Image (cartoon, helix red, strand yellow):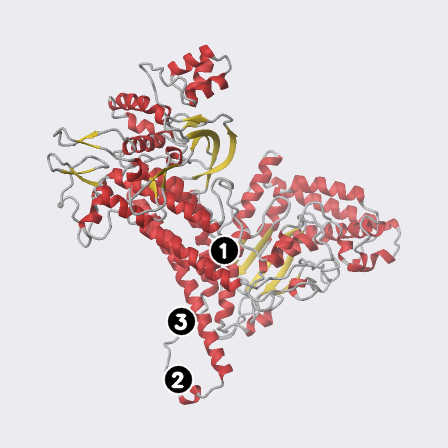
């Protein structure tokens, strides 16, 4: 019976209640349901421990309920006996090191010295209650009262639950309360005093300001109904503000409840405006850019699968531009509402640097302030920062600038700063919902459900991903010259035709847009510096250094020292190592310029190791603001969104001084005759980018001898509708991206049956001709995309190619044996396009066998490096 008692105690019951329930019910779950329904609330014992104050329960906690109040008070009395218990209350949450022995401010920051793991997983029983309504003067319709279940929703921490419960219980107690001066008079609080869910935050603040100051009718003393402390003009005086406003900064209780209700209103508004739901789509905000229909059509294609309609076909949908301006205007309106609401609530954040100096609540921070921020604000913060389109953020700068203000304010206060490094606990799933519905004393229904919460990246980690994009965008904007001060138009300019004036206006608009993006990028990087500086001041250097080791890394340059990555001892470990390595190296800057010849002058444009060298040199000194902005947005996307996986990855190298010069390497997808080969492309973002598509040349051609695909010619031509080299929906000016092009090549050209990419052969899947074509491709891949690339790695991908083959050596050797067994012993044909019309003797297999053996030898040598 001891194990069953412990199970019920972990669920939130006292030992006395557990023993009583198990005497009546043999099944543990039946006993638990009866306890949660309140059937054993009358059972007490001397060592009662309220579950909500037990942080050691890391896998299953239960929210406190009104019936637990007696238990809560008993627990609080026990805790008062030992002040040191406060440290332990916060020291057991997945900390991978002991709390600092010298922590002297555990009452200020309960999470001092604690690092949470993103692998955290919490199971919580949450309470849902029917809405209770109240009539408030001045409002024709009733005001909904925030229930205790809503107040505590999303809180998986036991100690935070305790604080939330205590504050809610105190401020919703409708029994007569004695005058704090002890004169014998009483007053009564109402639930609607502090927990009315008003239609807007301003109405709520006006209401609280009107009721929080109470004057005793007997002794005429004035006191705060939130904390029962005296209120005087001196205590609430703050320069530059009315005394009625200052009363709201009088105590930490007010701070906790104002932030809780304000963030509840904000969360509801945010969900309504975004069409999301923190419950129905719990914690799994998709980390994807907003894509056009053209992009969606092939992003949903499986890796290495053939697209219907022939290669180069990017889908049968066209960009729908209708209503775009209306949609943008509607988005700006919604962003303005959320931004204004964030600004209004931010006034009540603990802030020692507010105008006029810190107030009482700024110094005496209520523990529930952190609980509210970690739950409700973090949900909004995570959703917004997972928007990985820097261009979209820049367009919505009104909202994002206010979000950055919040993060800076939070990081500036010692009691809140650690939140920046703590993983955001997001709802992952609803495990179960109680089938029974209990009724509270007030007649309101209450249900219980079991929720799983999982850790996700911290606010600081999410910011780092945005910083990587911002730095990449700044690279694209570096060449933009600062606009000269506008000069007065001459008489000749005034007489210019309207079309010429329009060109001038467009140029000016492009420059303004560049400046907007530039300012936004600098604001992001400035916020991160300010946050790190504040964290060093409040948490110490060790805290910040440890935080930085867990952050995603900025794109490096090939000049930096490379670290040898070793394969794991198991296939699973090797795959994990490979993905981590690929993520860290997928996007880098490098020097693609050729060394200048003797006697060259500084004003001569350099030459580049690049197919489009001549075109690039012609634009050496070009200043095209619109193009620079397009490249900046492109780099921001590419820096964090290139697909990497064990099965297929995309690597990019961008010239560090000419970001319009790009080289790409794509590894062939699994299940295709291109698997694990390395395919190189030279890419140039020309003078009209992105009004026109980029120029792309395929470089892995065995010196112009091999045609690897009906759409990858031996001369390097890439046939793709997005590039305008194939029929079908093409490039959408200002909307399509280089990322679309790369993914289209990866998923539709490097496909499982390349023979079918030729429209005339599209119905010949599985035919002998198709099988023979794939066998021919496999032989070309081993000879050129594997063996030649490994023997003579092309710049600047030597490290990528060697690491790719070294980490996958064991897997590729198995793959080569399988390919050799399936080979048809034919001679390799360079122009695979006419293969189906030719018959070859079986003597050609020996060359393939030799290539396979040579490749295995090189792979074994690479394995030895491990």
Identified at 75% across, 48% down, the residue is 851
Q: Residue at x 47, y 81 (%)?
A: 501
Few, some or many residues within 10 Å of mark 3 (<14, 14–19, 20+): few
Labelled disc at residue 111 = none
Residue 489 circle label: 2
Q: Which residue is mark 3?
A: 482
Location of residue 832 with respect to 685 vertically, above or below: above
**Residue 835 against residue 261 in the figure, above or below:** below
N-term mark: 1 or 3 = 1
Q: Secondary structure at mark 2?
A: loop
Q: Nearer the viewer, mark 1 or mark 3?
A: 1
State the SS at label 3: loop
Contact (CB < 8 A) between labels 1 and 3? no
Q: Is residue 649 visible?
A: yes
* 434 is higher (above) or lower (below) than 582: above
Return the residue nearer the eye: 695 or 287: 287
Can you give x and y, in whole percent of width and height, for residue 133 in the image?
37, 38
**Relative to 9, is 588 above or below?**
below
Please state, as top left, top right, bottom left or bottom right, where the C terminus lies in the image.
top right
Of callouts 1 and 2, the N-terminal one: 1
10 Å crowding of disc 1: few (<14), some (14-19), many (20+)? many
Hey, which quadrant is residue 580 in on the image? Answer: top right
CB within 8 Å, label 2 to label 3? no
Residue identifier under label 1: 389
Q: How far apart are the alpha carbons under marks 1 and 2?
A: 38 Å
Pick the front one: 330 or 793:
330
Q: Secondary structure at mark 1?
A: loop
Is there a contact, CB below 8 Å, between mark 1 and mark 2? no
């Amino acid at each position: 019976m001891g194990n069953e008692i412990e199970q019920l105690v972990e669920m939130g019951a006292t030992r006395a209640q557990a023993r009583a329930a198990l005497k009546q019910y043999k099944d543990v779950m039946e006993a638990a349901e009866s306890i949660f329904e309140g059937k054993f609330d009358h059972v007490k014992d001397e060592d009662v421990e309220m579950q909500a104050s037990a942080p050691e329960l890391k896998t299953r906690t239960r929210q406190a309920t009104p019936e637990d109040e007696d238990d809560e008070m008993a627990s609080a009395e026990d805790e008062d006996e030992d002040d040191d218990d406060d440290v332990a209350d916060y020291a057991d949450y997945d900390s991978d090191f002991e709390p600092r022995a010298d922590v002297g401010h555990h009452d200020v920051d309960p999470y001092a010295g604690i690092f949470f793991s993103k692998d955290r997983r919490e199971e919580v029983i949450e309470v849902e209650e029917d809405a209770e309504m109240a009539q408030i003067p001045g409002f024709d319709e009733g005001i909904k009262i925030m229930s205790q279940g809503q107040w505590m929703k999303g809180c998986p921490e036991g100690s935070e639950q305790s604080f939330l419960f205590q504050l809610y219980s105190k401020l919703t107690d409708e029994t007569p309360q004695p005058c704090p001066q002890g004169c014998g008079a009483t007053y009564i609080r109402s639930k609607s005093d502090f927990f009315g869910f008003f239609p807007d935050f301003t109405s709520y603040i006006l209401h609280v300001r009107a009721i929080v100051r109470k004057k005793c009718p007997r002794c005429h003393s004035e006191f705060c109904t939130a904390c029962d402390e005296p209120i005087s003009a001196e205590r609430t005086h703050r320069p530059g503000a009315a005394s009625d406003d200052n009363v709201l900064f009088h105590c930490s209780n007010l701070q906790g409840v104002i932030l809780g209700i304000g963030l509840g209103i904000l969360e509801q508004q945010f969900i309504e405006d975004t069409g999301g739901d923190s419950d129905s789509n719990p914690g799994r905000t998709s980390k994807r850019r907003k894509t056009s229909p053209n992009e969606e059509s092939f992003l949903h294609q499986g890796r290495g699968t053939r697209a219907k309609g022939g290669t180069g076909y990017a889908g049968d949908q066209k960009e729908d531009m209708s209503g775009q301006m209306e949609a943008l205007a509607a988005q700006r309106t919604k962003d303005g509402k959320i931004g204004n609401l964030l600004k209004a609530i931010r006034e009540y954040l603990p802030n020692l640097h507010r105008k006029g100096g810190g107030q009482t609540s700024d110094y005496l921070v209520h523990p529930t302030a952190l609980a509210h921020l970690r739950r409700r604000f973090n949900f909004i913060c995570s959703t917004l920062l997972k928007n990985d389109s820097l261009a979209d953020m820049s367009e919505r700068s009104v909202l994002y600038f206010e979000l950055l203000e919040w993060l800076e304010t939070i990081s500036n206060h010692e009691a809140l700063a650690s939140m920046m490094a703590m993983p955001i606990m997001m709802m992952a799933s609803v495990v179960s919902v109680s089938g029974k519905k209990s009724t509270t004393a007030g007649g309101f229904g209450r249900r219980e459900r079991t929720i799983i919460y999982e850790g996700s990246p911290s606010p600081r980690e999410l910011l780092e991903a945005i910083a990587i994009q911002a730095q990449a965008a700044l690279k694209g904007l570096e060449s933009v010259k600062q606009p000269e001060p506008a000069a007065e138009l001459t008489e000749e300019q005034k007489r210019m035709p309207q079309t010429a004036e329009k060109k001038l206006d467009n140029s000016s608009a492009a420059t303004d847009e560049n400046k907007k993006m530039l300012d936004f990028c600098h604001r992001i990087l400035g916020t991160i510096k300010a946050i790190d500086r504040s964290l060093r001041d409040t948490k110490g250097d060790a805290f910040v250094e440890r935080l930085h080791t867990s952050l995603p890394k900025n794109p490096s340059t090939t000049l930096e020292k490379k670290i040898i990555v070793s394969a794991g001892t198991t296939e699973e470990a090797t795959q994990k190592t490979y993905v981590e390595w690929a993520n860290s190296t997928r996007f880098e800057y490098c020097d693609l310029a050729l060394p200048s010849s003797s006697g060259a002058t500084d004003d001569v444009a350099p030459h580049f190791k690049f197919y489009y060298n001549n075109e690039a040199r012609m634009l050496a000194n070009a200043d095209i603001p619109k193009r620079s902005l397009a490249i900046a947005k492109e780099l921001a996307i590419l820096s964090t969104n290139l697909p990497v996986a064990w099965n297929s990855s995309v690597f990019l190298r961008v010239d560090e001084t000419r970001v319009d010069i790009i080289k790409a390497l794509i590894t062939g997808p699994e299940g295709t005759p291109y698997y694990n080969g390395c395919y190189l492309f030279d890419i140039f973002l020309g003078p009209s980018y992105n009004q026109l598509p980029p120029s792309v040349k395929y470089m892995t051609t065995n010196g112009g001898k091999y045609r690897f695909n009906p759409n990858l010619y031996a001369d390097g031509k890439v046939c793709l509708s997005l590039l305008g080299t194939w029929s079908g929906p093409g490039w959408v000016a200002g909307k399509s991206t280089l990322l679309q092009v790369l993914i289209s090549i990866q998923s539709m050209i490097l496909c499982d049956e390349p023979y079918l990419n030729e429209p005339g052969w599209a119905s010949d899947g599985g035919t002998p001709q198709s099988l023979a074509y794939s066998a021919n491709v496999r032989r070309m891949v081993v000879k050129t995309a594997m063996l030649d690339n490994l023997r003579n790695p092309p710049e600047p991908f030597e490290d990528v190619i060697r690491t790719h083959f070294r980490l996958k050596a064991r897997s590729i050797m198995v793959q080569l044996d399988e390919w050799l067994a399936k080979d048809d012993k034919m001679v390799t044909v360079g122009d695979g396009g006419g293969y189906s019309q030719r018959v070859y003797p079986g003597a050609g297999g020996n060359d393939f066998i030799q290539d396979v053996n040579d490749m295995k030898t090189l792979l074994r040598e690479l394995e030895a490096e491990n």
